[in-house]
Amino acid sequence: MTMRITTFNAYENTISNLQSRQRSLQQSQQQLTSGKRVDKPSDDPVAAARAERALAAMTRSDSHQRALQAARSNTQLTESALGDAGELVQRAREALLGAGNATYTDGERSMLVQTLRGLREQLLAVANRGDGAGTYLFGGQGASSPPFADAPGGVLYQGAAGDTLVASNESLSTSIDGDSAWLQVPAAVAGDPPLSLFSVLDTAITGLLTPGATDAQISSAVHDGLRDLDACNNHLLSVRARAGEALNRMDSVELRIADGKLAAQTERSNAEDLDMVQAISEFQNRQTGYDAALKAYSLVQRMSLLNYIGG
């Protein structure tokens, strides 16, 4: 049986081959332009799924980095505030120590008491310092108003006790429990109730201003005030040290997040990025094949009976 290949069939096959090669060439051109081997899931479903998982991991890393930045910023501000408080307590200690000078007159001692009152006001301002974003460094788990209020009976804490944690895979705090830092200082004398920094200053001021106080009474007030101020200062130093440790820990967390993000970026690149050397070579081969298909098409176009009739 003789098989006959008509001119029409040859023409159809050539057109089909030409269109197929043209699509392949266009695909190579698109890949070279975008630099991506996988532009849509249908290009490579498995690689597309890998790239999507990697992208999700990168998004989580970005979220954790933002949370870390917020925690770092607040912790740095808190550490700085505690440093300011330490300097003010030291100045209060010097003023209190000076007030114990037995040679001072009531007027001279009164001037030092005014200094102590001014330092107390500054310490209260530090305790109520905001973070610039509408919340307070020592607001604990949240406070819509300054966490410390100066009441007739002494300074009261109006915040929510505890620390505020950011949404992250690491436990990172954005605030410090102000009640614990300022009003719950372990007493210098075993068995005594916790100290409040502000109450310590109030007690010392009251003792220095007691009418008709003897030198012994003044000396006792100064001695007790210095002892309790030192306890408060040591406590603030320990809180500041914890803030410093938290900053060091954040450095380690930042490195882990950066490593995880880099790994996700590498995985995504491996899944969908183009091997440029291989892609250029493949593009050139497809272009050569497309040129050959065009030549074949031009030959088929001339395969018509009309070309041979009438010479």
Image (cartoon, rainbow, N blue to C red):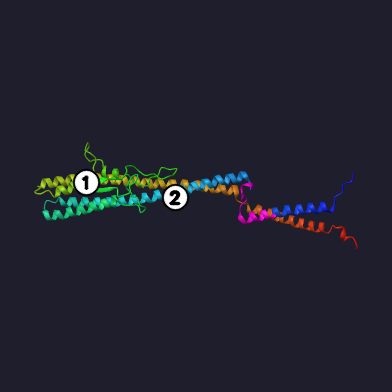
* Residue 28 inside the magenta-drawn segment: yes
Using the image, determine if residue 304 lies above or below residue 199. Answer: below
Q: Residue furthest bottom?
A: 311
Q: Identify the amino acid type marked 2.
A: Arg
Would you say 283 lies left or right of 171 here?
right
Disc 2 crowd, CA 10 A, few/some/many (<14, 14-19, 20+): some
Q: Residue furthest top?
A: 191
Query: CA–CA distance between discs 1 and 2?
Result: 39 Å
Would you say 302 lies left or right of 143 here?
right
Which residue matches tag 1? 154
Q: Is residue 257 visible?
A: yes
Dominant secondary structure of the residues highlighted in magenta in the image: helix
Q: Say which residue appears at 79% left-offset and 52% top-offset.
A: 12
Where residue 194 appears, as percent x and y from the top left, is: 24, 40
Front-most of 89 and 12? 12
Where residue 289 appears, as percent x and y from the top left, is: 74, 54
Q: Say which residue appears at 51% left-offset and 48% top-offset.
A: 58
Q: Which comes before the other along the chain, label 1 or label 2?
A: 2
Residue 280 figure quarter: bottom right
Q: Which residues are magenta?
A: 25-42
Which residue matches tag 2? 66
Where residue 173 appears, as percent x and y from the top left, is: 38, 45
